[in-house]
Image (cartoon, rainbow, N blue to C red):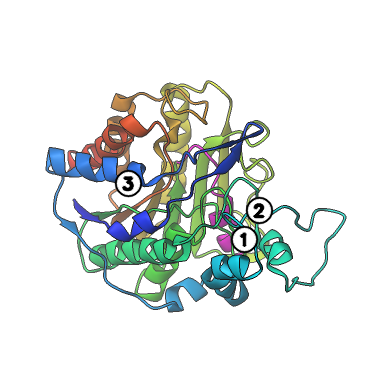
Amino acid sequence: MLTVYSDRHRLRDAKMEIHGGEIVAPFECPRRAEIILERVKYVGLGDVVEPKDYDLDPVLKVHDAGYVEFLSTCFEDWRAAGMKGEAIPICWPGRTMNSPHIPQMIEGKIGYYALASETTISEGTWEAALAAKDVALTATDHVLSGNRSAFALCRPPGHHAAMDQFGGYCFLNNAAIAAQYARDNGAARVAVLDIDFHHGNGTQNIFSRRSDVLFLSIHGDPSHAFPHFLGYADETGEGEGEGFTVNYPLAPGTPYSDWKKALIEAGDRIRDFAADLLVVSIGVDTYEGDPISFFKLTSDDFTDCGAYLAGLDLPTVFVMEGGYAVEEIGINTVNLLQGFDGAK
């Protein structure tokens, strides 16, 4: 399997996040991608290539133009306003301040475009996010050209990035950008399967009114897990998209046997949808040792998951999302990819 990877992910090297009432080093760090790449090379998964450069057109198909402009200048605007450290929201339009007005001062603007306060925008974040979307698009082009699969080793991740909001370590929604690009380049129907521990709220937001993109997410019950306010089973899409959003929220302590039941149900929905292409948002934070999750998957379970996905018999783009048990992230990610490759 081809892996697409860019060293430019290292430009995103934030020094802080808010976790458990403390300022801590971010769980989402450059070492994550490097460990995965090391494992890809160690097992001989396949060629590793640099991404091609793409313009912003594929991004603007799924993200609001004002939001994209905000991301591109946020850190510079933060510093120009005399702020210290990394850009972080301190207030945003909650339920009692539902205003259409976008503040001009960066302190207000960052709150308008933020969905959570744990994620900062640091120097180099925008450049790394651009590289990540190039990684996803290059992998998608590889599959659209007739190859069975490709792995987009994206960092920063993307599935929490909504049409016009960032958070959960995500800025541009790499999986959504890939899915829309596939639609624009010959795939009539695309399925996006999110198997990260956390619900792919951003991807759901982008496609919830669409019937040409099926979104499915298997994740920790949001009543117990981030992002808390989206990902419940009764969310099934809106308008034309009714029935094309499928959520499988699972309880704390869920073992692989129960998790796989949801995977099989999702697979049946994908078959019924008759997708032309599958985008998989990989998150190996479902691992039993992950520090910010509560499922109980083992490293061998990821191999079995990959083999099941291969049985769907679809051209498949794998897009890297989460996974924070850093020393195991390479083994678990590559096990899934090898499970897919081994089930030819």
- Image coords of residue 139 (percent x, y): 28, 61
Q: Are marks 3 and 1 in contact (CB under 8 Å)?
A: no
Within the image, what quadrant is residue 40 found in? top left
How dense is the environment of label 3, judged by Cα within 10 Å: few (below 14), some, or many (20 and up)? Answer: many
Tell me which amino acid carries mark 2. Leu
Quadrant into which the C terminus falls: top left
The residue that mark 2 highlights is 115
Q: Is residue 259 above or below residue 168?
A: above
Callout 1 amino acid: Gln
Query: What distance separates the C-alpha of mark 3 from that of mark 1?
Result: 24 Å
Residue behind mark 1:
165
Q: What residue lies at 63% left-to-right and 31% top-to-bottom?
A: 20
Residue shown at 62%/75% (left/top)? 66
Placement of 99 over or under 92, stated as above or below:
below
**Residue 196, image x, y percentages:** 46, 41
- The reply to whether residue 311 is visible in this rendering is no
Q: Which of marks 1 and 3 precedes in the sequence?
A: 3
User: Which residue is pictured at 21% across the width and 39% down the height?
Assistant: 39
Residue 285, position as x, y percentages in the image:
44, 34
| Residues in magenta, as a range | 196-209
Looking at the picture, does residue 145 appear above or below residue 5?
A: below
Q: CA distance from mark 2 to mark 3?
A: 24 Å
Q: Is residue 341 left or right of residue 6?
A: left
Query: Residue at coordinates 66% horizontally, 40% vertically from top-left?
Result: 228
**Residue 41 visible in the current orientation:** yes
Q: Which residue is mark 3?
A: 33
Q: Earlier in the sequence, mark 2 or mark 1?
A: 2
Crowding near pointer 1: few (<14 within 10 Å), some, many (20+)?
many
